[in-house]
Structure formats: C-alpha cells, structure tokens
Image (cartoon, rainbow, N blue to C red):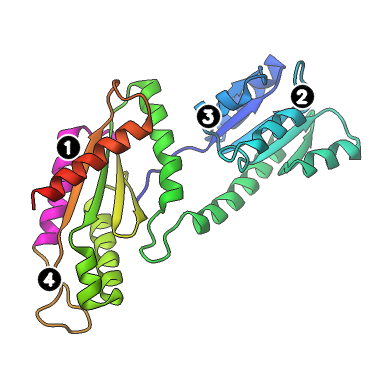
Amino acid sequence: MAGTKQKKRILVVDDEKNFLEVTNTVLSSAGYETHATSDATNILKVVRKVMPDLIILDVIMPKVDGFLVKTELNKNPATAGIPVIFLTVKHEIPERVKGFNLGADDYIVKPFNAEELLARIDAILNKKSFYEKLSMTDALTDLYNIRFFKRQFTLFFNTAKRYKKVFSLAIMDIDDFKNINDTQGHAAGDFILIKFASIARQTLRESDVLMRYGGDEFIVIMPETNNKQAAGAITRLKNIIKNKMFMFHDTEPGLTFSISAGIATYNSNLTNESQMFNLADQRLYEDKMKK
C-alpha cells in the first residue's frame, strides 16, 4: 500500500517535570516523536491536537488522576482506542486491576527500566498495527479504507494548520461505473477497481497516501504538494488510464474506463477538514460535468 512512513507519536502525561524530561530523552533516542504535558485537566484537547499512537499516563496527579483521565478518553470514540500504559509508584494489586478494568494495555511501576519500557511500548504498538491493518484495509484493492482516511486526514490537516505546511487532497471516481456493472457484470466492475488501484499505486509517489473511500471513489492525500503539482500528478494518472485497454476474461475488444477528479490544497482560510473535503468533492462534480 502506498503511504507515508511516520514516526510513532507518544504522549506522556505526568505532573513531574523531571520525569517528563527523562522519558522524552528515552523515547526520542528510540526514534519516537514525543509529546508531553503535566496538565491532565484538559486531556481531550491535548490528545486531539497530538493524535498519539500511545499514551503513557501517570496514575497519581494533582486535580485529576490517571484513572479519571482514562475514563474521559473511554467516553470519546476518537480516543477510546488509543493504547494506554499506566505509570505509578503503587504496587498494590487492586490498583492494577482498576487500571486494566478501564482498558489499560499495560502497567509499569516507577522507577522503571528504560529498556523494559521500550520493549513494552514496541509490543503494544506492533499488536495495534497488526489489528489496524486488518480493520483499515480494503479487502478488494488492498488499499487503506475510509476509517484510515478519516484518521490520516485529521492528522494531515492539523499538522498543516499548526506548522503552516502545504498538502493536497484529491477525490477520484470511475466514470460510468454503474454502466460497467450493469453491462459487464459486477465481476468486471471489481476487475476495474483492482486495476485502477494498481495503476494509481504505481503512478503516485510512495509518500502519497492512497485509499479507497467506498464504491468507485478513491482518495489520495499528497504531502508537501501544492495545487499545480497535485493537478499534474492527477493528469498523468488520467492519461495512463485513458490510453489503456484491459482484457477481462479474454473479452474483445477489452474494457476501457476513465476517471474524474477534484483537488483541494490546504490554505489558512480553511478552518476544518470538512471544508477542504467539500471543496475537493465540488471540484470532482465540476470535472465530471465537463464530460
């Protein structure tokens, strides 16, 4: 699958500043992108901003303890599935049981061994990646699916907004796809979807994140790409597809198809992901009306 190779993001929540510094050093040295906060009172806002792959959460903190933080995370569908490792100075079994009952993935007692902490993090993230691949992959095309798109789009948009980075979003669909299904059968339709996915994967850059949105619609997120560059990439893809004939079960003269696409590029006037998505969707409609 086409996609970007990004550092795993870990959020450390602890009221001890010295501990945050030490943990940040350990995690950064191991190749993780580390974020830290000593204030857990507004944890949901921090988590939405960081979108971490894992949270290391101290149990004993002033104002709000780690168990209450995890309870708040569990209430929100967007944060409930983020793995959590509890940190505590307490050794009591009831404390551990309480944490696991809240859905904690692991429990480490302070002071911890750095090598052990990294091993536990790796184990949790590897397990998470395995199940995410199963749940976020389209079975037909082997591309990422809509669940993965929603997560990645939020991450790219927030990063662009925070660091003033540019990226483009293209929504594509196959022209007259219903007619292919109606006249050639659904097997032919599936064949075209697989062929398109394969060509798009080979044509687009490795850093571009290609996904099947649903039906005959596909989406690609193009990092560090302005509108002109994105338009050039989509035009190349269109031309490759338009000039090809695909043999399906030795059919003569073969199957042909074309695509329509709409592109939106991030700019500071866009306040949320929906605006950018709707802009690309509108441009897809306009491109389709030209045909």
> Which class describes the residues within 10 Å of circle 4: few (<14), some (14-19), or many (20+)?
few
Mark number displayed over residue 245: 4
Q: Which residue is denoted by mark 2 in the rendering? A: 65
User: Mark 1 vs mark 3: which is more N-terminal?
Assistant: 3
Q: Which secondary structure, mark 2?
A: loop
Amino acid on which disc 3 is placed:
Arg
Instruction: Please indicate whether residue 170 sits to the left or right of residue 116 in the image.
Output: left
- Residue 103 on the magenta segment: no
The three-letter code of the residue at mark 4 reads Met
Q: Secondary structure at mark 4?
A: loop
Which of marks 1 and 4 precedes in the sequence?
1
Residue 82 image offset from top left, x and y in percent: 61, 40
Q: Where does the image place residue 223, in percent across and percent down from the top left?
A: 30, 36
Q: Tell me the quarter of the image containing the N terminus.
A: bottom left
Q: Amino acid at mark 2?
A: Asp
Residue 263 can be seen, yes or no: yes
Residue 48: numbered disc: 3
Which residue sits at x=63%, y=34%?
A: 55
Q: Which residue is mark 1?
A: 229
Tell which circle, 2 or 3, labels the residue nearer the N-terminal end: 3
- Residue at image position (37%, 57%) is 143
Residue 113 appears anywhere in the view: no
**Range of magenta residues:** 223-242
Q: Secondary structure at mark 1?
A: helix
Q: Amino acid at mark 1?
A: Gln
- Tag 3, which secondary structure? helix
User: Real-space Cα distance between discs 4 and 2?
Assistant: 63 Å
Among numbered discs 2 and 1, the one appearing first in the sequence: 2
